[in-house]
Amino acid sequence: MTDGFVTLNTDDGAMDAYVAHPTGHGRHPGLVVIPEAFGVNHYIQNTCRHFADEGFVALAPDIYHRFGKQIQLGYTDMKPVMQYLSEMTNDGYLMDIQAALRGLRSQPHVHSEQVGVVGFCVGGLGTFIAACHTDAQTFVAFYGGGIVTGRQGFKLHPVLDEAPYISRPILMFFGAQDQSISAEDRAAIERQLTSLNVVHQIKVYDQAGHGFMCDERDSFRPDAASDAWKRTIAWFREYLQ
């Protein structure tokens, strides 16, 4: 495996992205990995490396590039997290995701027609936005908040009413103990995707909360994380390979 940062172009200037490539020659499916609210930190880089170990080229865009270069925040740094999140917009987010998809497809070892998107936390919201408005082949969203109900003081707005634009399969994970995403919101997503005949699965883990995938947070739930990882890899292999 090889990894490192590259620089991509957006309409708002340069954006760094972390890329991990599988070992070996030939072309591979690609994944845009949209980070949590803490930036392209060790956990997100490690997740990209895990995807590379599974045979995917994984690229994680620096969604905070408008505020500084390669901003990485700790899990207790909530003041700057909220500051940066409050300034993000749907249009800017989509711009960055589209730039990440272009950058991923330009990688020499990527099958340009075998590209998916996966995201965590606010990256789960970004993944839903990508499902509505990009041509990636499939999507996996982990505990994406703000899809149904907006957050006070944030410029990011809900996108459930944009779901009619989704035409590709989407897999979504939630924790039943997540205090930031209600059971009513999860049910609204299920109803909307079902009514639109979108190919989808929604998996809820009863004993997990927000951030259950991250093994660097107190919210980590190993059983749920292991099962969700297996489902994610199987999903991408089904729809990308």
Image (cartoon, rainbow, N blue to C red):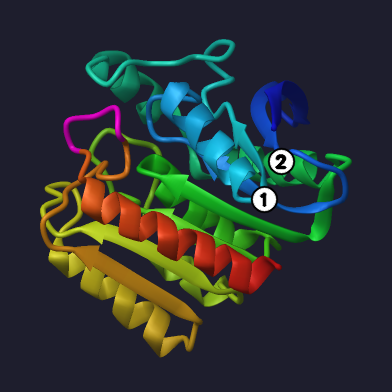
Q: Is residue 96 above or below residue 186?
A: above
The image quadrant where one finds the C terminus is bottom right
Q: Nearer the viewer, residue 116 or 88?
A: 116
Q: Is residue 23 left or right of residue 138?
A: right
Q: Nearer the viewer, residue 214 or 199?
A: 214
Element marked by disc 2: loop
Q: Would residue 159 be seen by someone viewing this image from the given angle? A: no
Q: Residues within 10 Å of mark 2 (few under 14, many from 20)?
A: many
Secondary element at tag 1: loop
Instruction: Give the residue type at disc 2.
Output: Pro
Q: Amino acid at mark 1?
A: Gly
x%, y% of residue 212? 25, 45
Q: Which mark is residue 137?
A: none
Label disc, if present, on residue 22 of the rendered structure: 2
Q: Pick the residue in front: 89 or 224.
A: 224
Q: Residue at x 15, y 50 (%)?
A: 178
Q: Is residue 167 left or right of residue 101?
A: left
Residue at 32% across, 60% down? 227
Residue 130: % across, % down: 57, 56
Does the magenta run of residues contain 58? no
- Vertical placement of residue 23 versus 141, above or below: above
* Disc 1 from disc 2: Cα separation: 6 Å
Residue 55 is tagged as: 1
Left or right of 233? Residue 157 is left
Q: Residue at x 71, y 41 (%)?
A: 22
**Is label 1 in contact with label 2 (beta carbons under 8 Å)?**
yes
Q: Looking at the image, which residue is at 22% across and 17% down? A: 76
Q: Is residue 75 above or below residue 160?
A: above
